[in-house]
Amino acid sequence: MNIDTERVVRRGDTVLTIDKVCYRYGSPSSVPALDNISCRLKAGQFSALLGPNGAGKSTLFALLTRLFVPQQGTIYLFDDNLVSAAAKVLANIGVVFQQTTLDLDLTVEQNLLYHGALHGLSTKQIREKLGDELAQFNLQDRLHDKVRQLNGGHRRRLEIVRALLHDPCLLLLDEPTVGLDIESRHYLNEKVRKLCDQRNLCVLWATHLLEEIIEGDDVIIIHRGEVKVQDNSQNLCAQAAVTDLVAAFHHFTKGHV
Amino acid sequence: MTMTAYWYCFLGVLKRELLRFVQQRSRFFSALVRPLLWLVVFAAGFRAALGIAIIPPYETYITYEVYIMPGLIGMILLFNGMQSALSMVYDREMGSMRILLTSPAPRGFLLLCKLVASALVSMLQALGFILVSQLFGMDAPLSGYVWVWPAIFLSALMVGSLGLLLSSLIKQLENFAGVMNFVVFPLFFLSSALYPLWKMRESSELLYYVCAANPFTHAVELIRFSLYSTANYFSLSIVLITTIVLLSAAIVGYDPKRGIIVRKV
């Protein structure tokens, strides 16, 4: 905890390397949830993880956060293996899960203090950062409100603030805009892009909503546990010989019902 | 990873447990009312029926209320241990357990933090009961009120470890009801909490051996002897060994997949 905070990350540095990772929920003969997947994510890059339901996105997030351990293959953050150097890797990862993980009966501040403590930060260190981080997401006036009093959009914003509290290099967001109105979706998407640019953050944003992807984004399409393609959005359309991302998505996930 | 970081991590977990405890006032009152009912109603009825012989650590005849006091403290610890286990299963299903498990600290350490924090909350509940029970004939030497705390803490760790192990084994929240019938009640009634073991032996030799083998009996006896500033090394050893075995099994067997798979299904 508080590990390797002095690392200087330059734009374009490879942050996350997923190398031939496999995972099955059942016996070795069961259908793999993730089958030999590989990809690389870079600093300052907004990567969108696209895939139909059951494609393996949430399983990948569980592997990236050490909730599950890969049965084959390796995951590196910079040069550190997630399994053998878990503490060092997790200290550099911020995560927003698909399902809300806030404690509804605690206040905004209490939730953030709890998270900071889990990352080895003192109350003083956390309080020094709280104001700026909350202000980024217009939540500075909600510090003493219980999370239960926040609407869905504000809860999501708070989860992102929490994920950034320990200065991670990699920010993982698993369908963070699910259940939000259009305005909140745009707000979150733009904010995260801005932070990605300002802080050289490596962002992995899992989504079903193609409108959340913009030209130049790195796009990873995952289907039936396999990475079908990883490229920027324009190249992806070119590869599929189509003009828009919707058609490209259908091209790479053919057969999906 | 520095020791200071570990310390902050532990404080964070403890503070959260305390905040939740303070917010759930009904939990505190039910933890207090349950043993008080036993003390005031059940003990009053049984006082006449049950004669308590002079057995260690007591040096004189005692009332039934005095006899069951350590058992009722044990009851508080047992119910709070199960309550904590229930809240861990709830946290796992609601997703907030994931935030704990994605901390850079080792999983074993995080679970140990939860266990110690829960034991400290149990001690607060026991303190409330001991204070109130002074009005109902609680009688122990002054030094006993000091020595009893390490015994209460160790016993709370033991039942908390059992709760932690159960929370690892239970697939979903709905299954927790069975724990009350198949774990809590047998542990409590097959112990020396409500009646001395020699009484049990008079009615059934088999039940006596079952009670003597029950680790909860030894938690209660550890508390009972500590209240009279007397060491009971045998019970202390049983409580320590049981805690280590249950805690190790809980840490090794803890599988965050359980909650996630249940949600997926």
Image (cartoon, coloured by chain):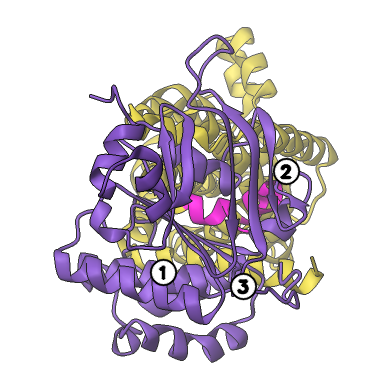
Chain colours: A purple, B yellow
The residue identified by callout 3 is A11
Subunit under mark 3: A
Quarter-of-image position of residue A104 = bottom left
Q: Residue at x 32, y 66 (%)?
A: A156
Q: Is residue A160 magenta?
A: no
Q: Quadrant of the C terminus of chain A?
A: top left
Q: CA distance from mark 2 to mark 3?
A: 26 Å
Instruction: Name the residue type under label 3.
Output: Arg
**Mark 1 secondary-structure assignment:** helix
Task: Pick the residue in front: B146 or B125.
Answer: B125
Q: Residues within 10 Å of mark 3 (few under 14, many from 20)?
A: some
Subunit under mark 2: A
**Mark 3 secondary-structure assignment:** loop
Instruction: Name the residue type under label 2.
Output: Val
Subunit under mark 1: A
Task: Give a yes or no on whether discs 3 and 1 share a subunit.
Answer: yes
The residue identified by callout 2 is A83
Q: Quadrant of the N terminus of chain A?
A: bottom right
Q: Position of residue A111 (x, y in %)?
A: 43, 71
Q: Is residue B106 magenta?
A: yes
Q: Is residue B173 visible?
A: no
Instruction: Name the residue type under label 1.
Output: Ile
